[in-house]
Image (spheres, rainbow, N blue to C red):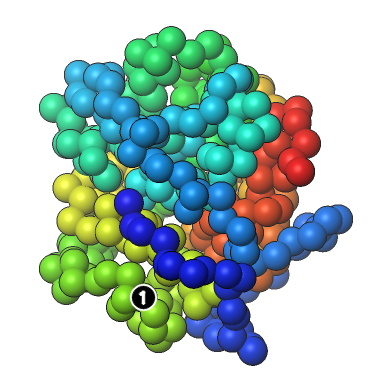
Amino acid sequence: MAEPESGRGRRRRPPRAVTYPYRRIERVEVTPADEPDPYGDDSPAWLAIDWGRHLRTIEAGGTPINYAEIGEGPAIVFVHGLGGCWQNWLENMPRMAALGFRAIALDLPGFGSSPMPPWQISIPDYGRLLGGFREALGLDACTLVGNSMGGFIAAEVAVGEPEWVERLVLVSSAGISHARMRRGPVLAGARVSVLVNPLLRRLDIAAMRRPGLRGLLMGGVIRHPEWMPREMLVEFIAPALGAPGFVPAVAALTGYDLLDRLARIRMPTLVVWGRDDLVVPAADAAGFIERIPGARLVVFDDCGHLPMAERPVRFNRLLAGFCGARAS
């Protein structure tokens, strides 16, 4: 884990936002915030935690799974997206643990510190992996939260194994427009991105001091990378570099069609999106809302593909309320 900056006080923000190219999808309306909704968190709880004490390894689906766990109580299982890792949920796990939940986030096989599985990566197999992971941990019904590809996998589980999903939270989830994508061009782009990984390996916290570099690396994913703690950006980027599961996972999610089965989802479902998402278009949110009975949609303004990290105060409050608690 990255070491926090010494003498860190309140994060100093630039006098104005640096704007990166993005497109707005006009059919999606922003959900007004009824309480404070800052960008980022000036007092990140995760920086004060010795995460080495919370890391575990367990075998599920015939493969070792690296995961982090903190807190006690009803379980919330967090699933990262393509190119992600368990650290994508750093802003959320301590807050949920403080509210009486058992927060668990895993590295999917082929990502982070979980090795490639002995089976071919696919959305259904990742879904079965989550079921095996849940059984190995001895969990009963729990809340399942997934971002991007992780949301796609969570939806697959909610359709195929609904008995153990008490609540479903889809965060900027893949699965709508990806069902119609052509695999060839998408895979070509994925392979090109892998080629630049050796250059990114030279990054460290000192390099992330430069707002221009933050924008170059994360401007297509995060709305305002210059406002994010540089320690967090390193935690997001470093475990993803050279992930062996990246290209196979791209192939797995591209063209996989879950659309006609989404109507089978019956558990309470919350859909959260960033209005300025460049990775998965905000219009895809409507695809889930139209198909999942009773699903609730919340769209964050001035937010990219990672609402849980970009606007963690509001996201944690929203998740806590959805799970029957109240964030402080």
Whether residue 32 appears in this view of the structure is yes
Q: Which residue reaches farthest bottom?
A: 15
Residue 164 in the image: x percent, y percent? Answer: 53, 15
Whether residue 281 appears in this view of the structure is no
**Quarter of the rendering containing residue 73:** top right
Residue 36 in the image: x percent, y percent? Answer: 79, 60
> Who is closer to the viewer here, 278 or 54?
54
Residue 287 in the image: x percent, y percent? Answer: 61, 47
Secondary structure found at label 1: helix
Quadrant of the rendering where the C terminus is positioned: top right
Pointer 1 residue = 208
Q: Which residue reaches farthest right?
A: 34
Residue positioned 21% across, 26% down in the render: 64
Q: Few, some or many C-alpha atoms within 10 Å of disc 1 (few <14, some 14-19, many ≥20)?
A: some
Left or right of 258 on screen, residue 328: right
Left or right of 113 on screen, residue 84: right
Left or right of 35 on screen, residue 174: left
Residue 88 in the image: x percent, y percent? Answer: 44, 50
